[in-house]
Amino acid sequence: MENPNPVPAEDPLSEAAIKTLLADRILSDLLSERQSERRWRWVKRITFSATGLGLFALYLFFYASSLGYRLMPHSEVVAIVNVAGPIGAGELASADELVPVLEDAFESTQVKAIALNINSPGGQPFESERVAQTIDRLKAETGKPVYAFIGNLGASAAYLLALHADKIVAGRYSLVGSIGAVITGWDFHKLAEKLEVNQRIYASGVHKNMLNPFVAMSPQSEAKAQQMVEQMAVLFSNEFKARRSGKLRTGYDYTTGEIWGGEEALALGLIDEIGTLESVISREWQVPGHDFGPTAQPKGLLPRLGMEIIEQILALVTSKDALKHSLWMPR
């Protein structure tokens, strides 16, 4: 009699099949894990590379900005050129600084007009002359209008520069003028006599040593210095009268060296309008202003710390430990 519930015979391949399945599963997992590691390795490479390039670009941007470089505008603007501080060789408001900025501004096809943003007590007249002649030349070549905007102060050589603009604008609280010339120097000769200090001087002419602070000026040298000042003052006065012709008050003495407030300067004909840089640019050209510089390099704790932090991050990203995972370093 047959057994109604026969026990199935043991499959001799089942154990081998199970081992094969397990091996396949393990191999599949290993391959999947390997692929995942490979993907993450590429992600890290791309991340480190992109971070390094981004920080390097940021560093270059801040570094270029600290040197006074500016991105050129992509739409129509009024170029703002800063005449800030004393005008003189080696200063921010020197011809070496201002002339290249003016050339960039006039040559840009996106610039509709140039605004001289003046906040200066004046300085060396020759530096102002170099900048003024550049303005006259570029105006003639391009036909672009130039407005001078006097902020807190536009005096002496700074006002001389403003005379070469098509229009001079100042605020009610601005200080304008100081038409004239001056030569200054120290006189220490009495102090040297008290200290019994003598200086040996071998000069080729009576005026060669005229501004030596340790020697009393001779009457001839004092007369010569005054003559030089008066000659420069006459040149300044003649240029002032020629460029403000028809706007000045008859019989008024403008060459006393004094300065005037904005409203009085307008009444006397030294300026053409009371206003500010922002209000006039908006009214006259309906486009934004764009700062062309020159601008002083950043000073103080925060700008310096910012540059140092960027440099440290760059050093970290490009260190040996980081580079071994980067795009250009094989494992």
Image (cartoon, rainbow, N blue to C red):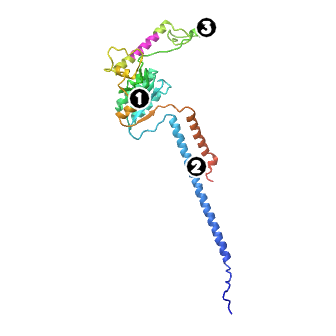
What residue lies at 61% left-to-right and 63% top-to-bottom?
Answer: 31
Amino acid type, label 2: Phe
Residue pictured at 58% horizontal, 57% vertical: 39
Residue type, numbered disc 3: Lys
Q: Which residue is mark 1?
A: 116
SS for dot 1: strand
Q: Residue furthest top?
A: 219
Name the quadrant containing residue 159: top left
Q: On the image, which quarter does residue 254 sit in?
A: top left
**Residue 123 sits above or below residue 48 on the image:** above
Secondary structure at numbered mark 2:
helix
Q: Which range of residues does the magenta coloring cover?
A: 224-235
Query: Marks 2 and 1, how far apart in space?
Result: 45 Å
Residues marked 2 and 1 touching at CB (< 8 Å)? no
The amino acid at mark 1 is Leu
Position in image of residue 84 (x %, y %): 46, 27
Relative to 25, is 125 above or below?
A: above
Q: Is residue 290 above or below residue 31?
A: above
- In the displayed structure, does residue 129 sit left or right of residue 27? left
| Residue under the image location 35 percent in, 29 percent down | 140
Give residue 160's quadrant in the image. top left
Q: Nearer the viewer, mark 2 or mark 1?
A: 1
Q: CA distance from mark 3 to mark 1?
A: 50 Å
Is 233 included in the stretch rendered in magenta? yes
Residue 142 in the image: state x and y as whole percent.
Answer: 35, 32
Left or right: residue 222 compared with residue 192: left
Q: Indicate the quadrant containing the N terminus: top left, top right, bottom left or bottom right.
A: bottom right
Question: Residue 194: which numbered mark, if any?
Answer: 3
Instruction: Name the N-terminal-most of marks 3 and 1.
Output: 1
The residue labelled by disc 2 is: 48
The answer to if 116 sits in the magenta stretch is no
